[in-house]
Amino acid sequence: MKKLNWKIRFKNPVFIAQLLLSILLPILAYFGMTMEEITSWSILGNLLLEAVKNPYVLGLIVVSVWNAVNDPTVSGVLDSKQALSYKAPKKDK
């Protein structure tokens, strides 16, 4: 069965940043905040708690994460056989 190569994706710092931003930015946009306003852990915690309580925000996050995880260069939603065979993120020469 085909799947996603999560182990390799999480070795790529660009993917990690993309995934974190795909979660955080919809939350900030919905609540009308900017990154500069997150000045304490309690503010971040309260913001995340309010986001989890809101089904619309959760929907925005799901769509955003889908866009970060999906590889548009393959047909379907799963990784190609080549991508599944990687032991480390592929580097262009």
Image (spheres, grey):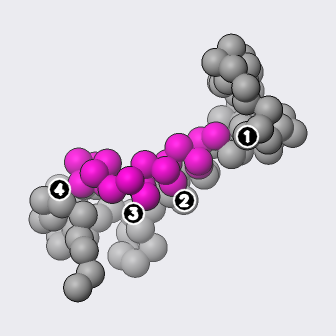
Label 1 environment density (alpha carbons within 10 Å; few <14, some 14–19, many ≥20): few
Residue bearing mark 3: 77
Asked if residue 17 lies in the magenta stretch, the reply is yes
> If you read the primary sequence from the N terminus, does the residue marked by circle 2 or circle 3 appear first?
2
Left or right of 22 in this view: 37: right
Name the residue nearer the viewer: 8 or 75: 8
Callout 1 touching callout 4 (CB < 8 Å): no
Judged by depth in the image, the label closer to the viewer, 4 or 2, is: 2
Instruction: Please indicate, yes or no, whether residue 45 appears anywhere in the rendered image.
Output: no
| Residue nearer the viewer, 54 or 37 | 37
Which of the two labelled residues, at mark 1 and mark 4, occupies the earlier sequence position? 4
Among the two numbered marks 3 and 4 on one chain, the one whose residue lies closer to the N terminus:
4
Q: In the image, is residue 14 part of the stretch drawn in magenta?
A: yes
Kindly identify the residue that appears in the image at 73 percent across and 40 percent down.
35
Q: Secondary structure at mark 3?
A: loop
Q: Is residue 33 above or below residue 81?
A: above
Which mark is first along the chain, 2 or 4?
4
Return the x and y of residue 43 as percentages of the image width and height: 73, 19
Q: Which residues are magenta?
A: 6-24
User: What residue did someone put label 2 on?
Assistant: 67
**Disc 4 to disc 2, C-alpha distance:** 22 Å
Q: Amino acid at mark 2?
A: Asn
Q: Amino acid at mark 3?
A: Val
Q: Residue at x 38, y 53 (%)?
A: 13
Classify mark 2: helix, strand or loop: helix
Q: Main secondary structure of the magenta part?
A: helix
Please identify, in this view, whether the residue under mark 2 or under mark 1 is nearer the observer.
Answer: 1
